[in-house]
Amino acid sequence: MGSRVITDEAIDQPTASGESGGEAERSAAGGSRELLSLALPLVVSQSFMTVQVFVDAILLAWHDPREMAASFPAVMWFWLPFGLLQVAAGYVSTFVAQYTGAGRPKRVGPAVWQGVHFAILAGLLFLIMVPAAPHLIAIGGHTPALQTLEAIYLRCLCFAALPMLIMAAINGFFSGRGQTWTVLGIEAAGTAVNIALALLLIFGRAGAPELGIAGAGWATVAGSWVSALTALGLLLRRKYAEEFDTRRGWRPERALFGRLLKYGLPAGAQVFSDVLVFHVFVQLVGRLGEAQAGATALTVRLNMVAFLPMQGIAQAVSILVGQRLGADRPELAERSTYTGMKWAFGYMCLVASAYVLIPGTLVSVFEGDRDPESFAVIAAIVPPLLACAAVYSLADAVNLTISFALRGAGDTRFVSLLTFLLAWPLMVIPTFLLVQAEGNLNWAWMFATVYILAMALCFTLRFRSGKWKSMRVIEAAPTLDDTAIVTS
């Protein structure tokens, strides 16, 4: 499903119903139908990731509750650098969207390849974390048993970075043009492999060795390579090579690569800062005890399950903003953003209601047969944490939608700076003082809620200022005068 750029000529055309083309386009462009046609495959794609995260957590909890608790700190250490790199590589989608909106398809392929080059370099450098894993894990100060499990999982995940980065860059080619069903297929292939192998390797079934938490990690590596190779094969198909230069455009372009880093790295820095502060938060509250660490990991896991599908809506908003700005239609970009916010907020209202009304039911799915006493202690701590999550999830609907809209315009430095400036005084430092005083875990989660509410207010003010409407990440198109100078 390709995305269509709205041109002045299209707006002037009459429709079959007798309504002017301009009225028809205005009634559709920026509305729910357009947004959801792009967002639905991305929501389902994120749901595959949700299923993957959810299934891994449940399987590990069934195998050993300590492995479930250990998996989250390891994932946080992994995402701390990886989030920055993945968003930078995936920022290709904004370039693709704006080139598509500007009607310049031959620049799409070269833009994607700059992301692939970055992905390869970053993925290889990521392997430095393999020998460093035990030392990084030790910083958390968790019990020796948890540290051993955390280090095992982190080492496995490091080998998944390269294929995941390649997939992020190539997925930008499809998502930036609105071909979101293809993104769904790529994600589905890897998720299916991941879940199937996790079932075998965690418990040692069908003749496979019982690897526990290591089995979950290696299943992630295998699934990531399946998705990456699938995406690469699709990118190199003849029809894309002819229209978008996806084969001949592989050469590095210094200026284009530089612009990808200029806008992509600040976007990645925002994710880095966000993951960093929550990583520090998890590490700090983990020092209150194993039960508190397990309750925090379980609550964040549940919140991730609910949060990931909402990212599909935000990604659709980013695509539409990029395409509209590429076509110099900022008013439609603004309308698409508010439409996305409406759907994201409505979805999170349902999630928040579940957190408040049925916390015991949500927690019970993680209960296994081994060590039920330890799980009961963890489960008793979770409900008030979910109540905090219910409040900040509503604010996160605003944060995610607007931050992705600003990202689609190229306003990435503000987003990154705001995340950094608010997090430390509102969440991290108060939590540190709380832990030093051996205070109650619920207060730490209240600090996190205040931080996210403050972000929602600041993002809203930035968006309403309208500065983003004049931003572009792509270079200006050559004019006729420029062409004449080159050819003369």
Image (tube, helix red, strand yellow):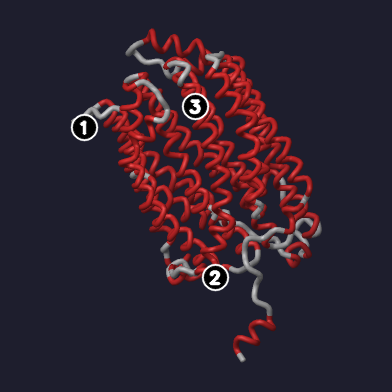
SS of the residue under disc 1: loop
Q: Above or below — where is 46 with respect to 378?
A: below
Q: Is residue 423 left or right of residue 84?
A: right
Question: What residue type is disc 1 on?
Answer: Ala
Quadrant of the rendered image containing residue 325? bottom right
Residue reaching furthest top?
A: 373
Residue 287, position as x, y percentages in the image: 46, 20
- Tell me which corner region of the image, top left, top right, bottom left or bottom right, holds residue 372: top left
Residue 75: where, in percent of width, then height?
42, 34
Q: Quadrant of residue 188?
A: top left
Residue at left offset 57%, top offset 21%: 433
Q: Earlier in the sequence, mark 2 or mark 1?
A: 2
Q: Quadrant of the N terminus?
A: bottom right
Left or right? Give the position of 28 relative to 354. right
The alpha-carbon separation of the residues under discs 2 and 3 comes to 46 Å
Can residue 89 be seen at all in this image of the molecule? Answer: yes
Task: Estimate how packed mark 3 is, as few (under 14), some (14 to 19) or many (20 or more) residues with alpha carbons within 10 Å.
Answer: many
The residues tagged by marks 3 and 1 sit, at their Cα atoms, a distance apart of 33 Å
**Horizontal and vertical percent position of residue 174:** 51, 55
Tell which circle, 3 or 1, labels the residue nearer the N-terminal end.
Answer: 1
Sequence order check, earlier mark of 2 and 3: 2
Using the image, tell me which numbered label, if any, was put on residue 282.
3
Q: Amino acid at mark 3?
A: Val
- Classify residue 299 as left or right of residue 454: left
Q: Where does label 1 land, which residue?
A: 208
